[in-house]
Amino acid sequence: MNRIIKILKYKFFIAIFFCGIISAQNNDAIIGKWDLNVKIDKRISPSWLEVKLSGSQTLVGYFVEYNGSARPISEVHYNNGIIDFSIPPQWNGETDLHFSAKVKEGKLVGTILGSNAKAYSFEGKRAPKLIRSNPVKFGKAISIFNKTNLNGWQPEYPNKKNQWLVDNGILVNPRSGINLLTTDTYEDFQLHIEARIPKGSNSGIYLRGRYEVQVEDSYGKDPSNILFGAVYGFLTPNEMAANPAGEWQVFDITLIGRRVTIIANGKTIINDQIIPGITGGAIDSNEADKGPLMLQGDHGKVEYRNITIRKGK
């Protein structure tokens, strides 16, 4: 009798083992990071998804909508080739967001039912790893703000009024409006930029137009992935290096592939960390492409000066 029980237990554990292997093999089709293009009205809006395995069989993940921060997904369901999950609302409505998709020829195709109860179709592709096989060297520092006018810069939406201006050699966003982009695009670079914000204000520096380094009145607060110096929603600084509101904040930022180092006010607060994906407010989800520097102007007042860049080669 004991021998029969042992045999049955052995067969049971073998069955569980092979089921786990089959499940893991099937899950490989969706595990990973995905860059998404979502059709919202007449435009394409970028979004991002990560699916990963938690333990032996549960799928979890993170999702970035076209705005807002990376949100955790408590469970990703994957059955009969369909991936779906729901997450609570953040900024865009009052009901849960529901995501449903299939993998077709290596692409993720499906529909998002937004928190505003509207349905949007999307298509996604696997995000590039952006690994650099050779060391990156940087050229001489080039000023990309001439202190006189907006030559070399353009509004994110040319058909909307641009509120940015130059005042006494300083690039000024006097009120909430639209974002400002460089006309030039960059791959790997070292950026020096100085920012000043009044109390309670908020802005951001988008690297390649896709990864936001947060500029916010955060003096005296604990570090967070949504406060000063963070890569918004993803990377938390190792300390709060913000000066008080009204003082200049000095940033030196190095971006190589996905790897970023951020020095704020002389302190290395993020050191050679991998940025998982695009942040909310990104210009697009084409992570393999060069992109502009973008300054956030749709949140509050901010000033920038002494903007120089060293291109990688």
Image (cartoon, rainbow, N blue to C red):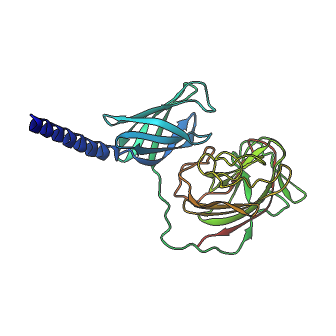
From the viewer's perspective, is 249 left or right of 107?
right
From the viewer's perspective, is 179 left or right of 87?
right
Classify 236 as above or below 147. Answer: above
Q: Nearer the viewer, residue 5 or 164?
A: 5
Q: Nearer the viewer, residue 66 or 38?
A: 66
Q: How many marks?
A: 0
* Residue in view at x 24 percent, y 44 percent: 17
Q: Position of residue 120 (x, y in %)?
A: 51, 32
Q: Is residue 53 visible?
A: yes
Q: Position of residue 41 (x, y in %)?
A: 57, 33
Classify 28 as above or below 132. Answer: above
Quadrant including the N terminus:
top left
From the viewer's perspective, is 199 left or right of 230?
right
Classify 237 as above or below 1. Answer: below
From the viewer's perspective, is 41 left or right of 146?
left
* Residue in view at x 68 percent, y 69 percent: 310
Quadrant including the C terminus:
bottom right
Q: Position of residue 107 (x, y in %)?
A: 40, 45
Q: Position of residue 257 (x, y in %)?
A: 54, 62
Q: Nearer the viewer, residue 266 or 182?
A: 266
Instruction: Please identify the quarter of the rendering in which residue 269 is found.
Output: bottom right
Q: Is residue 99 visible?
A: no
Q: Nearer the viewer, residue 81 or 119?
A: 81
